[in-house]
Amino acid sequence: MSSNNFMKKLLDGVEVEWKALGEVCILQRGTSATKNTLAQGNIPVISGGKEPSFYCNKFNRDGETITVAGSGAGAGFVQYWKEKIFVNDAFSIKTTDTLNTKYIFHYLLNIQDDICATKKGGGVPHVHISDIKDFPIPIPCPDNPKRSLEIQAEIVRILDTFTELTAELTAELTAELTARKKQYNYYRDQLLTFEEEGTTKGTKSAKKVEWKPLGEVGVGEFIRGGSLQKKDFTETGVGCIHYGQIYTHYGTYAEKTKSYVSKEFFKKARKAKTGDLIIATTSENDEDVCKAVAWMGSEEIAVSSDACIYRHKLNPKYVSYFFKTEQFQKQKRQYITGTKVRRVNANDLAKIIIPIPPLAEQARIVAILDKFDTLTTSITEGLPREIELRQKQYEYYRNMLLSFPKGEK
């Protein structure tokens, strides 16, 4: 059914009147306050962002309220509240008895981009009441308030249903992902844990396992990354890995790089070869420091500073999986230094002990973990795709349900 036919059936011949937002709703500025002027509590303080800026023990809005963030990157962001809130660097929208608050909220979401487009200001953009008070709002059946509210309620019911379904799907997919990650982490740690006497843990036929420092001669060496910054990136050229991308873009291994540098820059860069491990040696938190990716591409690539290259004679993926285990994390923690920026240097990384089974056993372990890694990654990538699909479906029906015939305001 097309949007026009659907709306025609829903409206059943009734008129739609367009009125200015400020004419049919009460728009009110927030009250300036800070953590120093409000005591801590559990009431959300609404300011310029998408999340409450902090929580206090006072409120200045009670009941159903729509808020529009007033400043910052999130200026213009629309939210709906049923609980008590404190409106700070934002403004609120209160509806009259002839309007459904959720109806107005859904409509404002439908024109969210138009609201955000009214931002003014240089360094810190702002959205003011005067910027949006004249936005036209469609009022169905204005001469029959009861019928008007029934139509608004039906639109809200349908859109709320899509919102709830999206939330339920997100929760289900997130729970599935969490369970798979726990299962994956468990098997990874089990496969990479060995008995102290030199046998593979849990196996009936013992296989010799040696424990050696990562930096021992004959095992591997650490090479510090070179001078490579994001400003050195080019559209095309030779592949490179910046240490910050190891946190956000790469997994256990990679065959292609996200970024490139020029051939001239590459000549003087520190390079990783096929099979090398690239390790981020700095981070803002202990969990991310020493995250690593095995480079499996066929060509050499450039590596940035705040990262190091581990060149070794082991199975590359085996080493990369080992860096994710609790036994590696436990050893790593004793070498972390720094306050705001956490760091582990290459000399200390070289002291970390790694269990080294025969290459055939390393390959067997990698084959098993690759399957778990693929499953977990597919779910991880599928989660945002599914959520985006449901969000687009909601937006489609929202636009369809709120596409009233335009008339004179």
Image: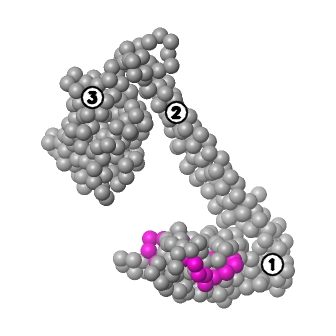
Q: Residue furthest left?
A: 268
Q: x, y percentage for residue 244?
A: 33, 49
Kindly identify the residue that appears in the image at 59 percent across and 72 percent down.
42
Which numbered disc, 3 or 1, marks the residue that appears first in the sequence?
1
Q: x, y percentage for residue 201?
A: 47, 21
Tag 3 near tag 1, CB within 8 Å: no
Mark nearest the camera among 3 and 1 is: 3
Q: Which residues are magenta?
A: 56-77
Q: What residue does disc 1 label?
A: 148
Q: Is 82 on the left-hand or right-hand side of 225?
A: right
Amino acid at the residue labelled 1: Ser
SS class of the residue under badge 3? strand
Q: Residue furthest top?
A: 205
CA separation, marks 2 and 1?
Answer: 57 Å
Q: Is residue 53 above or below residue 301?
A: below
Which numbered disc, 2 or 3, marks the residue that appears first in the sequence?
2
Tag 2 near tag 3, CB within 8 Å: no
Kindly identify the residue that appears in the image at 31 percent across and 52 percent down.
342
The secondary structure making up most of the magenta span is loop
Residue 115 part of the magenta-drawn span = no
Numbered tag placed on residue 279 in the rendering: none
Amino acid at the residue labelled 3: Pro
Write down the quadrant of residue 271 in the picture.
top left
Q: Is residue 28 above or below residue 406?
A: below
SS class of the residue under badge 2? helix
Q: x, y percentage for residue 82?
A: 68, 73
Mark nearest the camera among 2 and 1 is: 2
The residue carrying pointer 2 sits among few (fewer than 14), some (14 to 19) or many (20 or more) residues within 10 Å by Cα, namely few
Numbered tag placed on residue 186 in the rendering: 2
Numbered tag placed on residue 213 in the rendering: 3
Amino acid at the residue labelled 2: Tyr
CA separation, marks 3 and 1?
Answer: 75 Å
